Amino acid sequence: MNTDGPSSVIKKLVSDLTLTPVICLLVLAVVVIVVLFAPLIAPHPEAAILTDESFSLPDNVMLLGSDFLGRDMLSRLIFGARVTLSVALTISVIAFVLGCALGFFAAVKRGWVDSILSRSVDALISFPAIMVALIVISALGSSITVLIVTIALIDSTRVFRVARALGMDIVVQDYIEAARVRGEKMGWIIWHEMLPNALAPLAAEFGIRFTYAILFISALSFLGLGVQAPHADLGVMVKENMQGLLYETYTPLYPALCIAIVTLSVNLLVDWFLKATDAALPDEL
Amino acid sequence: MNEQNQITPVFEVNGLCVSAQSRKRHLTPIVSDINFSIEPGKVTALIGESGSGKTTIALACLGFARAGCIVNAGSAKLGDVDVLKLSNHQRRSIRGKDIAYIAQSAAAAFNSSLTINRQVTETAVINGIMSQTQATDKAISLYRELDLPEPETIGQRYPHQVSGGQLQRLMAAMAMICDPQLLILDEPTTALDVTTQIEVLRSFKKLIRNKKTSAIYVSHDLAVVAQIADEVLVLKEGRVVEYGPITQIIDHPKHEYTIELINAAHVMPEQLPSARTPPTRSDDSMSLPLLSVNTVTAGYGNSHQYLALHDVNLEAFKSRTIGVIGESGSGKTTLGRVISGLMNIKSGSVALDGQPLNDNINRRDREQLRSIQFAFQMADVALNPRHRIDKILGRPLAFYFDIPQESIKDRVAKLLELVELPVEYARRFPRELSGGEKQRVNLARALAAEPKLIICDEITSALDTVVAKSILTLLSDLQSRTGVSYVFISHDISIIVKMADTIAVMREGRVVEYGTLEEVITPPHHPYTQQLLNSVPVMRTDWLDNLATT
Amino acid sequence: MTLFVLIIQRLLLGIAILFLVSVLIFVGTEILPGDVAQAILGQGATPELLENVRIRLGLNESAPTRYFRWLRNLLTGDLGASMVSGADIGQLLGERVWNTLLLAGVTALISVPLALMLGLLSAIKPNSLTDRVISVVSLSLISLPDFLIAIVLVMIFAVKLGWLPAIANIRPGLDFFTVARMMVLPVTVLVFTVLAHMVRMTRTAVINVLSSPATEMAILKGVPRWRLLLVHALPNALAPIANVVALNLAFLISGIVVVETLFNFSGLGRLMVESVTTRDIPVVQVCAMIFCAVYVLLNLLADIIAIVSNPRLRYPK
């Protein structure tokens, strides 16, 4: 008999802990600490121009050299990562709360409620995500609020589909029927009966949505349509230092690598988590 | 058994062991030390409950082990060839041609994208035994032999275009296309309705007799096996507990497990225990119905587009059981859902103690909700896998009764005691319980509400016969102790006859016969009731043959 | 018969979606901003100037009137003029549409067969070494931003080795060889972006089909492996695979936008990004409409393939 309590899930997760997830967890821990305490950790202010030399080579003062304006690249990266991650986190939290709530609601209610919600989401999904973002930005301009709301909305349609599919699978189970026969209210059923059974796949989905938000906001910034001056995120830093390629420096590579390290760590963790908990996300993702 | 016999067996299994292999290469045996042999034209049955390893053995005879399993010892010889020692390529050429397989669910085993003929003739054609035309002709003659309708054209259809019973027979044609030396039938009638099962069983028997094919017949049902097998292996937890000719197993079983199996099998009306007092119309307890269903019509879809119940009338009485019997699609499950308020009614009414019940569950008051409880078929999915047993049982207590948190623990312990489970189970998760234990928790949850009526929807049909029997005994016990009434829904008339005081026979959404147990099982029967009664296999080897002549 | 009805239904639905897409694009770009005239002229605009622009753009009319005029013009091929340069949008698009189609086409031609092959390869033997390598590599590729792959490739092949040009400003009059040389890096980057998702989805789709009882039955019938894959599994996997390909178009489209900008490639994606930057609404509308229409139509095609490949719909009973 295998056990399936929360404590045993943790045991299983720990026993499946190979080198890869450990490294990913460490990387993410370091990133979180650096980002949280950016002003304390960054060696220089992000906007300070320390040299008149563009793309100077790394030295003792500037560990990663200077950027195209002569600012310290390392400090820029630390503050840039702070912007990227906080924007992406806000986006995914909003998308998640919205998508999950509506997805479960549609799964439990079914009928016309489900039809209306699902058809609206279908309509939104018949646009490629980047197109929705570009259309909205062309109309409203690119402010942080516009970016967060737009991408969160786009993302929530994907979360909706996942939550609805998971909910549909759970809602037909007899234990939900049993709760309904008992006379339980819908809120209680969603919270006590459904959510515990959807937790593992939803946690994985959150990781995936988070990486997606990071990549999306970075791509927009790289196109010059995302985060605007005076703020700068990692995508902006790739864009502004692109000319460095001509000088054979690695400068534009650093912010791109920062993004990749975070997204790769999260994705590998999600992979390990899904395998260890035997959870599965609905297909078509 | 037949060591001294002169006839050389067609197929011989010696010391077969199959194990499950974990990711760390750790082996756990599934079946061990299996020995048996099959003589030409004879049928050997593998009998056992779920987890006994019978399917594992059947698949190993084809040189196949499911993902995560390996055959780690023994031999399975077809003539002189050990199937287990062949290369992948050699094995492929034996499968389908020399050893053929009939799976439990034909609906799942047929490829939905290919025509039936294409799948039936495939093995013959790819092995170069016949041309496509020859193979098709052979298939048509097999269809005819299997009593399939329109044998000339049925093969041109796709699997979804024929019924389940027909598909099962078409799979037999697929298996017989190359005239294999050995046929393996894996629970071939289990997924079918009882009345269809008889037809299919009869076709299979005819085919095996006519072709003189040796066969392995896998089943959990000893009475079914008695109709078709010559020898029987009784399996328990991966080991053979008894092996011998069918008559010997049925009439003089040696091992206690075999005896248990036979005792738990179907009981026919004539074998009913006389201790039970059959209720009559004049009985006092039957004067005022606890629950009455009055000309209820209900259906699915928008505004009851697809009707599942037509003008259904029936009554349940205090401390009595009403048995509702029917095959799939008869509307018996819909009836349960209507009574419990999970489904709306189109016309008619349901009343409890003379008070009308709202058909919408949200409009029933707490007392009405508490009075009617539901016990589900699949205990596996009826218990939330993320809740411990004490939460599963504690919730209805907290929901229906205003009792303090501390005393819930004691009540949960009492409930576990009531269904004969150890008190320590309160801290367990459903997965840590066996199927029968889960079904007991399922019942305890219904009992927690101290209901007047429990709707039992096929609660024993997912269980092994021995476990099912213990659940039925528990149900009777609980009724005499608590005075609860049951609406007992089942497809199995032998169980209904054992449990019910009154019986409603349902077919296509209508009650075709309704009365006390005695009224229903005493001739003359309604023709459909007769058909159902005839469909219950009797633990006699000549039952099917005699039935065929009547 | 029902099959025919279903396809007609799906086509009508496709048209309805296209219509809806056009409404949303129009609403998104013209009604949300409040005052387009103000946006064009900036803060220093005088009331007279604003009024002039409004009249010129027809902004004083009701939204539905403007929408239907815009749609009629769009359908008759009159795409209007750029708000920024005044150039005719039809002319602006001309070459670029073909360039983008070339880029997308070559990418699809390489990535789709490659992805299906790799997906099948890892699905045949789940958890084998091949499967695990493919799975880890594709997961890593999914995690990388498009521009990282581009930067690394440019650094190696354009800057260090000097084998390929770092920009791909293809224009009329270039010979085939030059164009081909220019296309190598953009196409490679795009293939990498699209491939990973497609491989993973194909793997899931094929594993689902292969784990069915029908597959076990076919094995027990002695069907050889190639036949199992091609005759038994493929017809069932066709619908999910078509779906996978169509779904990945979304990644292709966003990839195109980034890659065109990065390589200075004269195509629709870059035009759109530039127009969004300068808020050249009419151009944005037309570009968005083209991208969305292609996306909707190809998804429609996948749907129809799914319908046609399903025998339950072809031969109802």
Image (cartoon, rainbow, N blue to C red):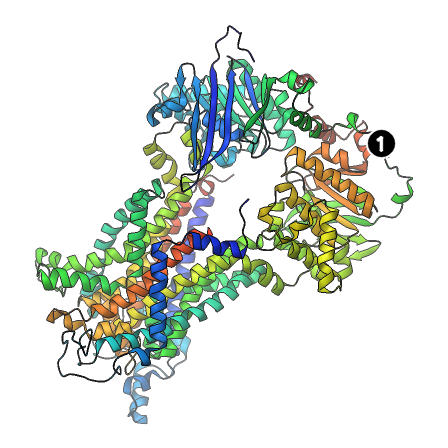
Left-right relation of B23 to B526? left
- Residue at the farthest top position: B6
Q: Which of these two is toward me, C234 or B100?
A: B100
Residue bearing mark 1: B275
The reply, left or right, for residue C75 in relation to residue B216 is left
The residue sitting at 50% across, 59% down in the picture is A199
B14 with respect to B274 (left or right): left
Q: Above or below — where is B451 with respect to B324?
A: below
Chain ID of residue with mark 1: B
Q: Position of residue B491 (x, y in %)?
A: 68, 36
Q: Position of residue B526 (x, y in %)?
A: 76, 31
Judging depth in this view, the residue of A57 and C83 nearest the camera is A57
Q: Residue A5: x and y, percent?
A: 55, 54
Q: Residue A236 sits in which quadrant?
A: bottom left
Rendered-image quadrant of the C terminus of chain B: top right
Q: Residues within 10 Å of mark 1 (few under 14, many from 20)?
A: few
Above or below B223: residue A116: below
- The amino acid type found where label 1 is placed reads Ala
Pick whichever, B209 or B470, lies toward us.
Answer: B470
* Tag 1 secondary structure: loop
Residue in the image at 34% along x and 40% along y:
C124
In the rendered picture of this protein, how many numbered marks are placed on residues?
1
Residue C287: x %, y % from top left? 28, 68
Describe residue B240's horizontal placement relative to residue B370 as left or right. left
Res A77 visible: yes
**Residue B238: quadrant of the picture:** top right
Judge whether residue B365 can be spotted in this image: no
Q: Quadrant of the N terminus of chain B?
A: top right
Kindly indicate the quadrant of the structure image that contains residue A65: bottom left
